[in-house]
Amino acid sequence: MRPFRFCPLADLPTVARSFWIALQREYKWRTISPVRFLESDMSASTIKESRLNVRCDNRARQLLDRAAAYTHVSVSEFVLSHALASAEQVIQAHESITLNPINFKAFLAAIATPVKPNAALKRAVKRHAKQARG
């Protein structure tokens, strides 16, 4: 069975894609994620339209300076790249669902089969429409 993902595997580097597919086969799970993660290009040609200021103590600043120096990037590039990676992990954890094969098939069946709205759903739609009109 092919992996079911909204986040295309083609976006991953070849080695990571192979590893991802091997994990899916080994543990027989599927990830459903409506989020396509941001691809950040930290090159000098990138136009940066927004500014972010961070306050920290001297120890934190020295630590960031050392880490940035080891990776041969500016402190801004170091902080931004690591903050983006962390943000992607948080988003993935909150906006994806991992299902075993049985539940995955049940999920596909549920979204493929339309159901008639019951009375509670009809009331909720009316309530929402009333609130949206203000």
Image: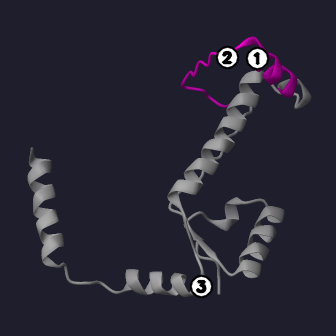
User: Which residue is disc 3 drawn over?
Assistant: 101
Which residue is located at x 46 percent, y 81 percent? Answer: 107
Q: Amino acid at mark 3?
A: Pro
SS category of the residue bearing label 1: helix
Q: Amino acid at mark 1?
A: Arg
Q: Earlier in the sequence, mark 3 or mark 2?
A: 2
x, y percent for residue 70: 91, 29
Which residue is located at x 77 percent, y 80 percent? Answer: 26
* Mark sitting on residue 56: 2
Q: Can residue 131 be seen in this snapshot?
A: yes
Q: Quadrant of the N terminus?
A: bottom right
Residue 121, by quadrant, is bottom left
- Compared to residue 26, the image places residue 5 above or below, namely above
Is residue 70 rendered to the left or right of residue 29?
right
Q: Residues within 10 Å of mark 1 (few under 14, many from 20)?
A: few
- Compared to residue 63, the image places residue 124 above or below, namely below
Residue 122, by quadrant, is bottom left
Which residue is located at x 63 percent, y 15 percent? Answer: 55
- Real-space Cα separation, disc 3 to disc 1, in angstroms: 47 Å
Tell me, yes or no, whether the two marked residues, 2 and 1, touch with CB atoms within 8 Å.
yes
Which residues are the magenta region?
45-67
User: Which residue is disc 1 drawn over?
Assistant: 61
* Mark sitting on residue 19: none
x, y percent for residue 86: 66, 43
Q: Amino acid at mark 2?
A: Cys
